[in-house]
């Protein structure tokens, strides 16, 4: 690797801080901020879920959530089947495990983001978890654990094709972090046609050898 391609941890954090997932502008930022405050006052989960394995058999007891709340986990459990589609296993137990491990990787990935992007994603999740805005803006009437695959798919399609930038960028943020968490996992490389790192890299780089 050449020197100019290597970034320090501080440089990577700074780059992520300057890069906006939502690019909402002042109006969108004020709206998201208002929703986030209202959601917190209404009792929506705001603290990271921590270790769920002891009380929730869907999750690995060893993993501790450091960003996603229990409400966020319900949100991604509803959205991932619509985002990933046939890439998910069909067998129910294997499918459930694939979704759970992807959500854990989403949390681990967001935890490494800079504060600015974490703040934007927190507001986006609050927007979708808060009942009033879930119904009025996402147009999903049931809570996320009760939402159907068809309702989740319809929501994503509306935001993808919306003329409102906040919704377009929200769609991109949700699908981007979900796809990276799923297809970036070594056991899922083949689903995207990625054969894995070349053999010379595996031999030369210890991090590939130990991956």
Image: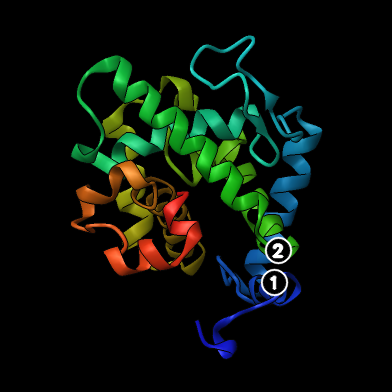
Mark 2 to mark 1: distance in Å? Answer: 5 Å
Which quarter of the figure has residue 8?
A: bottom right
Precedes in sequence: disc 2 or disc 1: 1
Note whether 15 is above or below 140 in the view shown. Answer: below
- In the picture, the disc for residue 171 is none
- Residue 140: image location, x then y, percent: 42, 34
- In the picture, the disc for residue 114 is 2
Which quarter of the figure has residue 149?
A: top left
The colour scheme applied to this rendered structure is rainbow
- Residue 18: image location, x then y, percent: 67, 77
- Residue 179: image location, x then y, percent: 37, 51
Query: What residue is at 71 percent from the left and 30 percent from the top?
Result: 44
Query: What residue is at 40 percent from the left and 53 percent from the top?
Result: 175
Query: What residue is at 72 percent from the left and 65 percent from the top?
Result: 116
Q: Marks 2 and 1: CB-CB under 8 Å?
A: yes
Instruction: Identify which residue, 40 or 31, lies in the foreground.
Output: 40
Instruction: Identify which residue, 68 or 131, lies in the foreground.
Output: 68
Note whether 146 is above or below 100 in the view shown. Answer: above
Is 70 situated left or right of 165 in this image?
Answer: right
Q: Give neighbour class at mark 2: few <14, some 14-19, many 20+ (Cα, 10 Å).
A: some
Q: Secondary structure at mark 2?
A: loop
Note whether 71 is above or below 59 in the view shown. Answer: below
Q: Is residue 154 visible?
A: no
- In the picture, the disc for residue 17 is 1
Instruction: Identify which residue, 125 or 205, lies in the foreground.
Output: 205
């Amino acid at each position: 690797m050449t020197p100019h391609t290597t970034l320090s941890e501080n440089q990577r954090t700074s780059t992520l801080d300057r890069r906006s997932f939502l690019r909402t502008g002042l109006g969108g930022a004020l709206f998201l901020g208002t929703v986030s405050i209202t959601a917190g006052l209404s009792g929506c989960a705001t603290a990271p879920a921590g270790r769920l394995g002891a009380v929730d058999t869907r999750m690995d007891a060893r993993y501790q959530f450091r960003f996603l709340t229990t409400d966020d986990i319900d949100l991604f459990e509803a959205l991932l089947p619509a985002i990933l589609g046939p890439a998910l296993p069909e067998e129910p137990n294997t499918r459930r495990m694939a979704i759970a491990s992807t959500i854990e990787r989403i949390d681990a990935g967001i935890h490494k983001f800079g504060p600015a992007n974490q703040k934007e994603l927190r507001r986006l999740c609050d927007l979708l978890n808060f009942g009033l805005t879930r119904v009025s803006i996402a147009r999903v009437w049931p809570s996320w654990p009760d939402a159907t695959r068809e309702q989740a798919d319809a929501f994503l399609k509306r935001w993808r094709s919306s003329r409102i930038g906040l919704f377009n960028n929200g769609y991109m943020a949700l699908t981007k972090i979900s796809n990276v968490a799923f297809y970036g996992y070594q056991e899922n490389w083949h689903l995207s046609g990625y054969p894995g790192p070349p053999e010379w890299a595996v031999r030369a780089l210890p991090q590939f050898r130990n991956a």
